[in-house]
Image: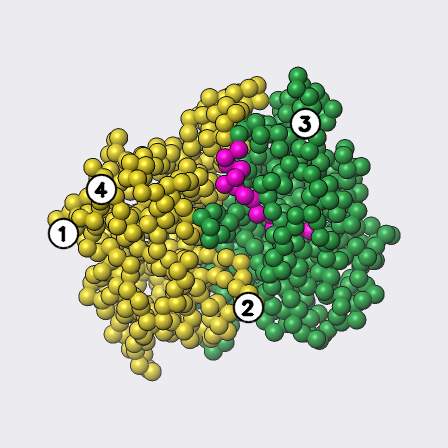
Chain colours: A green, B yellow
Amino acid sequence: MSSQDSKSTGPAASGFSRRRLFGAVGAGAALVGVGAIAGNATATGSESPTSDVVEFRGDHQAGIVTPAQDRMHFVAFDITTDSREEFVALLRKWTDMAERLTKGEETFEDGAVGAGEYKPPSDTGEALGLAASSLTLTIGFGPGLFDRFGLADKKPASLADLQHFPADNLDPARSGGDLCIQACANDPQVAVHAIRNLARVGFGTVSVKWSQLGFGRTSSTSTTQATPRNLFGFKDGTANLKAEDPQMLDENVWVDPADDQAWMGGGSYLVARRIRMLIESWDRTTLKEQERVIGRSKGTGAPLGLTDEFDALDLDSKGPDGPLIDADAHVRLASKEELGGIQILRRGYNFTDGSDGFGHLDAGLFFIAYCRDPLTQFVPLQLALARTDLLNEYIQHVGSAVFACPPGLGESEYWGSTLFA
Amino acid sequence: MSSQDSKSTGPAASGFSRRRLFGAVGAGAALVGVGAIAGNATATGSESPTSDVVEFRGDHQAGIVTPAQDRMHFVAFDITTDSREEFVALLRKWTDMAERLTKGEETFEDGAVGAGEYKPPSDTGEALGLAASSLTLTIGFGPGLFDRFGLADKKPASLADLQHFPADNLDPARSGGDLCIQACANDPQVAVHAIRNLARVGFGTVSVKWSQLGFGRTSSTSTTQATPRNLFGFKDGTANLKAEDPQMLDENVWVDPADDQAWMGGGSYLVARRIRMLIESWDRTTLKEQERVIGRSKGTGAPLGLTDEFDALDLDSKGPDGPLIDADAHVRLASKEELGGIQILRRGYNFTDGSDGFGHLDAGLFFIAYCRDPLTQFVPLQLALARTDLLNEYIQHVGSAVFACPPGLGESEYWGSTLFA
């Protein structure tokens, strides 16, 4: 994994591109093709040709414990077809597309300029010249899918719309969905291009219900990554599960088929929550209050009273005025110590979606978590937070969705093949 | 200018940061401060310590001919104070903040953790550890400003809300504004952080009217940059004005005080148009039709019938079936040849703002242009396009605004000092 973000136009600027054009038609297209294919063997900027490609197939889907990329485009779809065959055909087609896209190739072999001039291009073209950018595409199935196609018996017991939590203020237009695709990449145009092309070929079979762009990751999923900051200015996800601890992932993230639907073995559950941050209120709060609310130092990210971000959280620590970590501090309520050992893998993103019409920025955290069972992990965690978290004065949950993400793909498998087999 | 985008967490990951913490308070904060200041003398990734700082002061504002950065956050404000003194004080304060931010420093000297624990932090903190990222901040004044503060006599004759163009479908909530700030950077979190902090200290004096994030630049403003692609998949802005041609900039971008308000000498007019792209319709159109609409080859960006992107546009070229460039092709109608020599500096961004509630992505081009006079440059250009451009079938203008951007700042000058002197 390269430590450099790929600049949208960097590769093109030097005349090299990892993104290949196939089946070039016409003199102009052929010229591009030659340059691009030649460039494929050449490093783009400081990246080696393959350093920014994340393997698409494997035991688990990519995009879960993959070191969190910097940018995200997340989409939820409604299913608009009654035909199981048509839906499965789309999943097969999507799988082929996704595998190509994650390699930095065009959506289909004939691509943006090679399908023949009397056909719509088979790729929309805006990612031509851009690197693979560590793109991952991760699919999840929502509860509504299992009301269709004779799948009722395959529905996991843990897959249902989340309960109403105290202070939830959910917008139905930003909640739910029959399936989702999470695109993460280090170049936002690469992530948007992927979602846009998948949505495009889904026309008539699925319809975009909602989508969300995230511009900055808010968690590390690998010990190789520094902890990023959320829009409250605090390091976020210090105690997150990490890719380097497979035992913890087995215990908390990956589904064991012995206690779930067999088709979900090696999969995971994705919980998405659009959390609006009331940043204007937060910004008028004293540093002391901000740190009391979170339970960590704003500068270092260390637990209050300690000095290093990764110092162990001591919930019993006392200062002259009482507990150093407030009884309702976010870090306490969200800790595995208070939750009987519950842990989840967080993989959220900061967002800013224009303004809210009242003179404020519409900004916050698009929370994404992966867990082995939302009912025994996310629900008790969120109940604890929703009841008394000091942070509740400054946030509002405005969107919610849950999806069952099937396991990774072996050769020749497709998205959902264990479910539809 | 580095050719590498700065990854949000790259610098922090290696323990180094160009963003300094001043006035550190407490042991934890001091530890961060030491590390950060030490890191200031150290390269972050492949960038040298200063390679990603764009000079804030100069003859012209930065962010106009500065090589277009990859990401943008644009905000328009309404003025909510009746006090000229209060407004000028904000402009002075903003100028100090902006100069610091573009250097990669915190908003104020005391910063996110140094203001004292019983005060709100003077910086919101989410950019701690991030590089300067070529941040530029560019201010513009809208027509409404000149209805206030005794400024009526200083209002430029060319500064007025743009006329209604055929097929305009403007949303008032995405149009106009008494002033604007354009933040461009190679890291979106740096751009959002800047706008968020400027809006924060403006509370009570100005109020956010609308804001827009852009994730991919759609124009080059320097010959050192490759031409990027818009969401129609075409190279955009091939014939754009470039920083390397100062004579053309003088003729088309920079205001000559001899024919405008004296305070605008060296400034420029900014026209912003939120252009929704009907990408689902476009994506179902044949390659031949797409290329006919634009007038260029999708692969190479060359004018139809030619082979290289930068081949001169020949509007008289003929093929066996008639003109190679359609009479209503976008490239013809927008060309200086057809417009009596009119040229503008384009500096727009691709956007995707979730979905539109009808199963489509809300995506398009946030068009930004700089020109010497919107009435004699942008208006005739847009009239020509709005009447017959083949592209009109696939786009809709949904937001519009125009701002007068004052000249660059000498030492000790502030944003608007030539206007308020």
- Residue denoted by label 1: B259
Mark 2 → mark 3, Cα distance in angstroms:
47 Å
Q: Earlier in the sequence, mark 4 or mark 2?
A: 2
Label 3 crowd bin: few (<14), some (14–19), many (20+), radius 10 Å: many
Label 2 crowd bin: few (<14), some (14–19), many (20+), radius 10 Å: few
Q: Earlier in the sequence, mark 1 or mark 2?
A: 1
**In the displayed image of the protein, which residue is found farthest to the bottom?**
B321
Q: Chain of mark 4?
A: B
Tell whether label 2 touches label 4 (CB within 8 Å): no
The image shows residue A23 at horizontal and vertical percentages of: 51, 68
Q: Is residue B334 visible?
A: no
The answer as to whether the residues below labels 2 and 3 share one chain is: no
Q: Earlier in the sequence, mark 4 or mark 1?
A: 1
Tell whether label 3 touches label 1 (CB within 8 Å): no
Camera-nearest residue between B392 and B219 = B392
- Residue denoted by label 4: B419
Mark 4 → mark 2, Cα distance in angstroms:
46 Å
Q: Indicate yes or no whether the magenta region holds residue A272.
A: yes
As shown in the figure, which amino acid type bears the numbered disc 2? Phe
Closer to the eye: label 4 or 2? 4
Identity of the residue drawn at 64% across and 66% down: A78
Mark 4 → mark 1, Cα distance in angstroms:
16 Å
- Residue denoted by label 3: A325
The image shows residue A46 at horizontal and vertical percentages of: 49, 42
SS of the residue under disc 2: loop
Q: Is residue B70 left or right of residue A144?
A: left
Q: Which mark is residue B125?
A: none
- Tell me where the magenta segment starts and ends, as one range: A270-285
